[in-house]
Amino acid sequence: MQKRVLIVDDEENVCDVVARLLERDYVKVLQSFSVSGAIEIIDRETLDCVITDIRMPSGSGIDVLEHVRSTDPQLPVVLLTAQASLQSAVDAVNKGAFHFLHKPFRSEQLRTIVSNAIEMRRARRENAFLRRELRKKVPTRRIIGKSPELQEVLRLAERVAGSDCTVLITGESGTGKELFARFIHQRSRRDERPFVSINCGALPENLLESELFGHLKGSFTSAHRNKEGLFQVANGGTLFLDEIGETTPAIQVKLLRALQEREVLPVGGTQPIPTDVRVLAATNSNLEERVSVNEFRADLFYRLNVVPLHVPPLRRRADDIPLLVEHFLRKACEGEGISLKRFEKEAREHLKEHRWPGNVRELENIVERAVILVDGELISADALPTAVRTGAPGHPSEGLMGGQPSLEELERRYIIKVLDESGWRKKRASQVLGIDTSTLYRKIQRYRLGSDSSGQPSSVFAPSRG
């Protein structure tokens, strides 16, 4: 992404000289001849460095410096003056200036200082991102499995990793779609740059827009300072958009522009900001069906679906279950600081035969729960949830409370029945249920319902027919 520098000086020829020098280094230079004009630009634009004269008729460069320190402390400021002294240089640095330069300055000296300032800005952004990642305390995770179904997906992921194409990762909830996105990023030419992820279904539209594209100070009530969006935070790296199917039409329009034009427009901004980001997206819904009922933009779908990558559900990877169980056992025991436990033979058989509607996430939760609740070294079948022991289909929460099914479970069963009877035609099913098609999609996702690759209801979601 092209770097952006603001030069502030009441002498127009000084601004022109600085612009010509920095443009040799492919830097976009913005100019202001007054302090007030500079402050407006700083509040409106995303900048990598500010160069300002100290003494101007309209005010002091120190005012510019103090405004930057209050709104964006990480933005480096270089001060210029024709009346330099050791004390003024010390004062400027104490106030937070990156450097102090005496006029007339040498061309190479200015270019070197600005280059160092821009590099420091980049390093600060990356350090801030890494600190956020560390605060999440998310352990490193890897893709476990040797089944042909999983290996086929891994081979495709390896092939597309070296390019910059957009990949749409599909699969049921809990199959590990973000792991595959990280796998692609780690094997790409962008692997030394940030991997940034966001769950598009977890935020309301206005907050999601601000998170993705950034906002300018004053663009809404709580916008007290400029904020970079994740497209800028991920610059040079990869942006993973999870649950892309949950985005609203307004967000979809902005995402389409970001993909087509490779630029974003912050909330409250008027000037687009170039971006260099590889986008990976994921969904557990059928976007083609959503497009057919005008609930997802067709043009955005085709932009995202350059390379489709489908992660198989765990029930189609039975050979991987023992490997995953051992991995999660080791992880859970290490987390508890205890000796490694193991499942008895009967328990292992139940785990392998279960249909896993919650996929790998459900398996990990059940193993972790067993490790915590069982005191001895051996974990028997009795420590497993009823649904796993009995082979009952359905919801991961089923069997935890016992007794009569909950209202949610009754609703889930009724939706399955209507979907089965309608041949899983969502529009027809929504009419029978008396709800909007979009509401039906949300309930399908909530209850983790779906269909297999043949388009027929998957047995894990439909009642057993013997």
Image: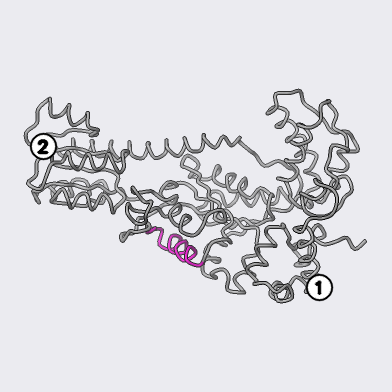
Is 134 placed above or below 152 here? above
User: Is the C terminus in the top left, top right, bottom left or bottom right quadrant?
Assistant: bottom right
Question: Closer to the camera, 322 or 111?
Answer: 322
The residues bearing labels 2 and 1 have C-alpha atoms spaced at a distance of 80 Å
300 vs 460, left or right, is: left
At mark 2, the secondary structure is strand
Is 40 placed above or below 291 here? above
Q: Is residue 264 magenta?
A: yes
Image coordinates for residue 243, horizontal then vertical, percent: 59, 56
Query: Residue at 47% across / 39% down in the picture?
Result: 192
The quarter holding residue 319 reads: top right
Query: Residue at 34% across / 48% down in the picture?
Result: 224
233 vs 440, left or right, is: left
Residue under label 2: 81
Q: Earlier in the sequence, mark 2 or mark 1?
A: 2
Q: Check disc 1 and give the amino acid type.
A: Glu
Label 1 packing within 10 angstroms: few (<14), some (14-19), many (20+): few
Secondary structure, magenta segment, majority class: helix
* Label number found at residue 421: 1
Question: Closer to the camera, 220 or 271?
Answer: 220
Count of numbered tags: 2
Image coordinates for residue 126, horizontal then vertical, percent: 42, 38
Residues rendered magenta in the picture: 249-265
At mark 1, the secondary structure is helix
Q: Check disc 2 and give the amino acid type.
A: Thr
Q: Is residue 399 magenta?
A: no
In this view, the mark in front (2 or 1): 1
Q: Which residue in the rendered view is the most extreme toward the right?
A: 466
Label 2 packing within 10 angstroms: few (<14), some (14-19), many (20+): many
Image coordinates for residue 35, horizontal then vertical, percent: 16, 48
How is this picture coloured?
one colour
